[in-house]
Amino acid sequence: MAKRVPDASALEELLTAERVSTLRQIAALTRDWDGLVESSADIGVDDEHDPEGATLAFERSQIDGLLSRAHEHLTDLDSALEALRAGTYGTCERCGDPIAPERLTARPAARTCIRCAAAR
Ligand SMILES: [Zn+2]
C-alpha cells in the first residue's frame, strides 16, 4: 500500500510532542480548577444568587469544558500512537477507509475519515 502520509518516525515525534503539551495543558487546567474550588470554598458562594458565584460557576464550566476536550484529545493521541505502532495509522476506525492525508496533516490524531466525522 502506498503511503502518502508523513513517515512514521516524524509522525510519532509530532504526536508525542502534542501529547506532552496536552498533558501540560491538563495540569495547568487542573491547577486553575483547584484554585477556583478553593476560592469558592473561601467565600462560601451561592452559585445562583451571588453575582460572584455566577462568575465562578461560569469559569468552572469553562475549565470543565476545556479539561474534557483536552482529555479527549489525549485519548485520540494515544490511539493514534498505538495505531502508528500497529501499522494501522491513517485508517478510519469506523469505515476502514484511508483517512485523507490533508486531514491527517491538519489533525494528526484524527481517528475517522472526514465523512464519518461529519456523520457523527
Ligand atoms: Zn470513515
Image (tube, rainbow, N blue to C red):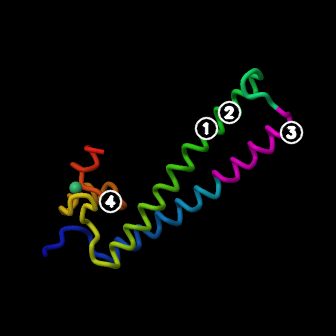
- Secondary element under disc 3, as helix, strand or loop, is helix
Please give the range of residues in magenta.
29-44
Percent x, y of residue 24 = 59, 60
**Left of 112 or right of it: where is 12?**
right
The residue at which mark 4 appears reads as: 111
For residue 81, which quarter of the picture? bottom left
Q: Earlier in the sequence, mark 4 or mark 3?
A: 3
The residue at which mark 1 appears reads as: 61
Which kind of residue does numbered mark 1 sit on? Ser
User: What is the CA distance from the residue labelled 2 to the residue labelled 4?
Assistant: 33 Å
For residue 63, which quarter of the picture? top right
Residue 76, compared with residue 13, is above or below; it is above
User: What is the CA distance from the residue labelled 4 to the residue labelled 1?
Assistant: 27 Å
Of residue 24 and residue 83, the one placed in the foreground of this image is: 83
Query: Do residues under tags 2 and 1 come within 8 Å of each other at their CB atoms?
Result: yes
Label 3 environment density (alpha carbons within 10 Å; few <14, some 14–19, many ≥20)? few
User: What is the CA distance from the residue labelled 4 to the residue labelled 3?
Assistant: 43 Å
The residue at which mark 3 appears reads as: 42
**Left of 38 or right of it: where is 90?**
left
Which quarter of the figure is the N terminus placed in? bottom left
At a point 69% along the width and 47% down the height, the residue shown is 33
Q: Main secondary structure of the magenta part?
A: helix
The residue at which mark 2 appears reads as: 57
Residue 114, compared with residue 55, is above or below; it is below
Name, please, the residue furthest toward the left. 1
Label ID, residue 95: none
Percent x, y of residue 47 = 73, 28
